[in-house]
Amino acid sequence: MKIARFLLKLFVIFSLPFGIVAALLLALIGGLTGEVMGYGNGAVTGALAGLFGGCFAGMAFGGLMTLLLGGVHLTQTRNTQVQHSASFKFSGNGADARQLCQDAISQVPGTAFDPDLSSDTVLVATKERTWKSWGDRISFTISTPETGQQLITVESRPVMKATMLDYGSNEENVAIITRYLVEKRGVTQVSL
């Protein structure tokens, strides 16, 4: 059901703008052509034919782009989400946890910390733009539950909130950080 809803959203996003523009242009061209040719009610008939042609063109374009881009996204990521997260337990103090997060983010290529968005308990890094993406925002939240251990939650999401396709870049960011924290630093991953 999630995949069907995802593909329907893509279809609407791709087909509506193209269909509206194509319908208006084809209606204008059809109306002018019908008027010039001097057919009975040529302007109206040509305009209506242009509107229907534009709607059909929009649906065809939307369907094609949904199949192409949606298919590529689904085959690369195997899911429809663009936001990914993971949580970890760390036996250390807050300063050590903060340093651990800074070390982990240095493992993700093309990232830099954003001090304007960061605080004592939240670290935010931004990944550079690529031909596939407008960039990603990776955030670490450090909290101390009752157990005395530090709980580190990492979240990666697109910089642009309207992004529906990320081709797996946010999932890859979380996987790189998880691999570093668990394998290299011995931090325990938890599921919330």
Image: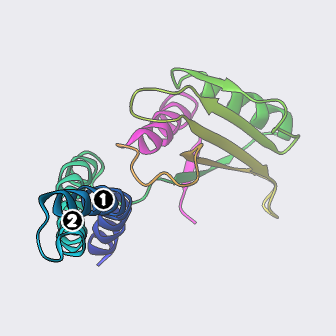
Q: CA distance from mark 2 to mark 1?
A: 7 Å
Q: Amino acid at mark 2?
A: Gly
Residue 91: in magenta span: no
Residue 80 lies, with reference to residue 104, above or below; the image says below
Left or right: 79 as drawn, with respect to 37? right
Residue 67 lies, with reference to residue 178, above or below; the image says below
Q: Which residue is denoted by mark 2 in the rendering? A: 50
Quarter where residue 15 is shown: bottom left
Q: Residue lying furthest right in this view?
A: 120
Left or right: 56 as drawn, with respect to 179? left
Q: Can you say which quadrant of the picture contains the C terminus?
A: bottom right
Q: Nearer the viewer, residue 93 or 166?
A: 166
Q: Which residue is denoted by mark 1 in the rendering? A: 28
Q: Amino acid at mark 1?
A: Leu
Span colored in magenta = 168-192
Residue 161 lies, with reference to residue 138, above or below; the image says below
